[in-house]
């Protein structure tokens, strides 16, 4: 439970509620809903969203970026979307293995589903020094294109590794890949997403098609050219293995985020309605909410949920 948004100022807050995470016919559903459905629309501009909790089962999981309590105002709206994030941080973590997930991505404008991994302990330091593995991310829009005209909505998924000595030295562009479908979308049926993680490297594949293979011969410090890019900064992985920071235990996360000020570039074009906020706007959440009539009709019931058939992990 948190409203923090991981530094991306996403428009959802995560909560434990069966409206947002539930099982049905053997599948897990992670479905975003409107905060106003629970609290009323006026709550967004005048309410207090408190997620502190009172017992071990409902304590807020992230206070950073005002994640446990926020107060709405006429310009600074509270998170207008309620969603879910499932983590194995307290139940399961592993180092090296194969993760296989069968999932259907959500369809709907500005939805941001993800299946990913974070380190159990920040052994090498705060993000991104201890690494992040994004098995799959997608954007729910049906008609979203980048400046080159390529569809970057639900016809595309991506896999990414985040790593660097500290923020903003995050060399993720060197370890990022995408896959586009020639027909159909990743939200129209289930697809198989696989992470192969060994002491020799990391590979991500989709429907047995390898899209990302990372095997830095001299380690990630040299691969990121940080001696030049971050002069004077010490190598946090100097005493780790060649694969550091990806040589410690990680845990699994599955969530559906919405919007935010990073993942949906202002350079993208959306049809038929443009993106209703700018990433540098101080009123981004309010602008998004006021554009509800353009995006909410694209969230069609459970098609707006990420659906997961199974998650399998083999530890090496």
Image: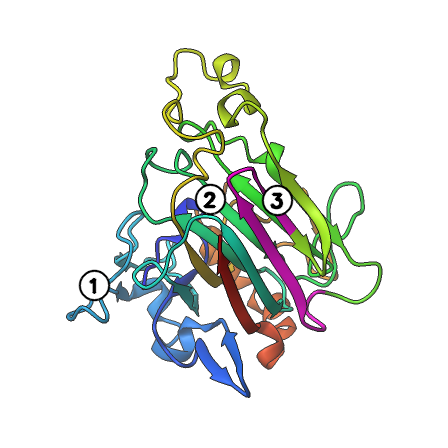
Q: Which residue is mark 3?
A: 265
Could you tell me how far apart the alpha carbons at marks 3 and 2 are, in whole angstroms?
21 Å
Could you tell me how far apart the alpha carbons at marks 3 and 1 are, in whole angstroms?
32 Å
- Helix, strand or loop at disc 2? strand
Mostly what secondary structure, the magenta segment?
Answer: strand
Could you tell me how far apart the alpha carbons at marks 1 and 2 are, in whole angstroms?
26 Å
Residue ID at (54%, 24%) = 224
Residue 294, by quadrant, is bottom right
Q: Nearer the viewer, residue 215 or 108?
A: 215
Residue ID at (43%, 35%) = 245
Specify whether residue 316 is painted magenta: no
Q: Is residue 210 left or right of residue 87?
A: right
Q: Nearer the viewer, residue 96 or 222?
A: 96
Which residue ends up furthest to the front in the rendered image?
316
The percent coordinates of residue 45 (x first, y second) are 35, 63
Q: In this rendering, which labeled residue sits more in front, label 3 or label 2?
A: 2
Q: Earlier in the sequence, mark 3 or mark 1?
A: 1
Q: Nearer the viewer, residue 295 or 151?
A: 151
Residue 276 in sight in this render? no
- Mark 3 Cα-neighbour bin, 10 Å: few <14, some 14–19, many ≥20: some
Q: Which residue is mark 2?
A: 132
Magenta residues (range): 186-204
Q: Earlier in the sequence, mark 1 or mark 2?
A: 1
Query: Image height check: is 216 above or below 280?
Result: above
Q: Which residue is mark 1?
A: 52
- Mark 1 Cα-neighbour bin, 10 Å: few <14, some 14–19, many ≥20: some
Residue 143, by quadrant, is bottom right
- Helix, strand or loop at disc 3? loop
Residue 182, by quadrant, is bottom right
Specify whether residue 196 is painted magenta: yes
Q: Earlier in the sequence, mark 3 or mark 2?
A: 2
């Amino acid at each position: 439970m948190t409203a923090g948004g991981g530094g991306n100022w996403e428009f959802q807050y995560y909560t434990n509620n069966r409206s947002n995470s539930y099982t049905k016919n053997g599948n897990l559903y992670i479905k975003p809903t409107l905060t106003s459905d629970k609290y009323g629309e006026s709550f967004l501009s005048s309410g207090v969203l408190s997620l502190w909790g009172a017992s071990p089962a409902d304590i807020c999981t992230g206070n950073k970026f005002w994640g446990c309590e926020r107060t709405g105002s006429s310009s600074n709206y509270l998170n207008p979307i309620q969603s879910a994030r499932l983590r194995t941080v307290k139940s399961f973590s592993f180092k090296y293995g194969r993760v296989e997930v069968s999932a259907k991505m959500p369809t709907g404008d500005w939805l941001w589903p993800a299946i990913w991994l974070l380190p159990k302990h920040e052994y090498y330091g705060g993000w991104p020094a201890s690494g992040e593995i994004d098995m799959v991310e997608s954007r729910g829009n049906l008609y979203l294109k980048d400046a080159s005209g390529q569809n970057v909505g639900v016809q595309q998924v991506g896999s990414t590794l985040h790593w660097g000595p500290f923020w903003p030295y995050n060399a993720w562009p060197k370890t990022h890949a995408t896959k586009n479908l020639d027909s159909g979308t990743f939200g129209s049926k289930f697809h198989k997403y696989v992470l192969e993680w060994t002491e020799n490297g990391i590979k991500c594949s989709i429907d047995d098609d390898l899209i990302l293979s990372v095997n830095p011969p001299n380690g990630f410090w040299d691969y990121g050219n940080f001696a030049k890019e971050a002069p004077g900064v010490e190598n946090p992985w100097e005493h780790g293995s060649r694969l550091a920071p990806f040589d410690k235990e990680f845990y699994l996360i599955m969530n559906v985020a919405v919007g935010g000020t990073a993942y949906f570039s202002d350079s993208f074009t959306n049809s038929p309605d443009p993106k209703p906020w700018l990433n540098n706007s101080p009123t981004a959440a309010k602008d998004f909410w006021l554009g509800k009539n353009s995006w909410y009709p694209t969230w069609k019931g459970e098609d707006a949920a990420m659906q997961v058939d199974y998650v399998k992990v083999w530890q090496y």
